Image (spheres, rainbow, N blue to C red):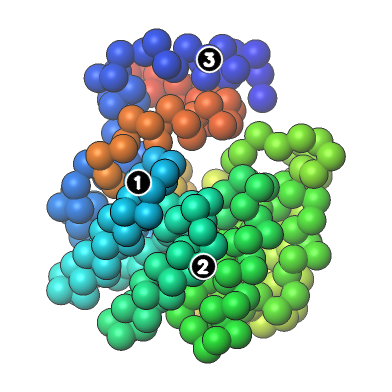
Amino acid sequence: MTGLDRAIARLLPVVPRPVVRRLSSPYIAGPSLEDAVRVVRRLNSEGKLATIDVLGEEVAREAEAGAITAAYHGVLERIEREGLEANVSVKLTGLGLELDEGLCRRNLEALVSDAAGRGNFVRIDMEDSRATDATLRVYRELQAAGHANLGVVLQAYLRRTLADTPGLANVRVCKGIYVEPVGIAFHDPDEVRGSFLATLDALLNEGAYVGIATHDEQLIRRALDRISARGLARDEVEFQMLLGVRAARGDELVRAGHRLRVYVPFGTHWYEYSIRRLQENPKIAGYVAADTLRRLVRR
């Protein structure tokens, strides 16, 4: 993370909304479900899978959690109706975790049951470290209750992550984007990579289905080595990437016969999502700025 990255992140709140919209447009489908459906259709035509995320800000009332839950039911219905190769990713804070864990669990279980009836799947996104224990607890409770169409996320930069792997059946492994204190998170890039690979090995040893979520070429290559060495079939593991990030590398993985799932966020809270995500990880702000500059130079 450089001083320039931090400077870009600090300046974001004073950047005009139209400029932020242009900066974020490659990485967000748009404000509506129609936008997400359009993007997923294109991804499917390219041989890629998708996971759809409904953007939402902090939930302060039960009705707001209910509205986000209802929006996800709508997404599941639309995926089935359109025959899309996609599932959904949910944030438990959006379903009411900070209001009442029981409310959140009921909202999530309703979504998981709806998805199961449609032959679909729900992934619980991982948020900052304050939510880690509750997120894993809710996941394990529903897993124990027989909900097999449910997965969770582990963030490799947390020091606790390797110890969280036992018993998890379906996991997305990512580096992690939230800014956390050094006492609970690795800050050195090589340490984060080492934790990522150790977590991946532990999950594969347990027979878990793993979504390898990274744009880091070192990690992609080392994950490919593991897939080859273990003789894993196409339906035993997948790669995952963010919409608009390293799409050409994603195309290469698809051509090589690997499953690739692309994270597709949409919603009217695109501005809040963009500002928050870029400020949570200033390194991403620098990446987006550099990527935008490359686009302008090409034009």
Residue at coordinates 67% horizontally, 82% vertically from top-left?
207
Residue at coordinates 53% horizontally, 15% vertically from top-left?
10
Q: Amino acid at mark 1?
A: Leu
The disc, 1 or 3, on the residue closer to the chain's N-terminal end is 3
3D distance between C-alphas at marks 2 and 1: 22 Å
Camera-side residue of 226 and 116: 116
Residue at coordinates 33% horizontally, 22% vertically from top-left?
20
The disc, 3 or 2, on the residue closer to the chain's N-terminal end is 3
Q: Badges 2 and 1: C-beta atoms under 8 Å apart?
A: no
* Percent position of residue 232, x then y: 60, 79
Q: Quadrant of the N terminus?
A: top right
- Say which element carries label 3: helix
- Say which element carries label 1: loop
The disc, 2 or 1, on the residue closer to the chain's N-terminal end is 1
3D distance between C-alphas at marks 1 and 3: 22 Å
- Work out whether residue 236 can be spotted: no
3D distance between C-alphas at marks 3 and 2: 37 Å
Q: Residue furthest right?
A: 183
Circle 1 residue: 55
Camera-side residue of 163 and 291: 163
* Percent position of residue 255, x then y: 41, 63
Circle 2 residue: 102
**Among the 4 quarters of the image, the one containing residue 79:** bottom left
In the shown orientation, is residue 184 left or right of residue 29? right
In the image, residue 175 above or below residue 272 = below
The label on residue 10 is 3
* Percent position of residue 228, x then y: 64, 73
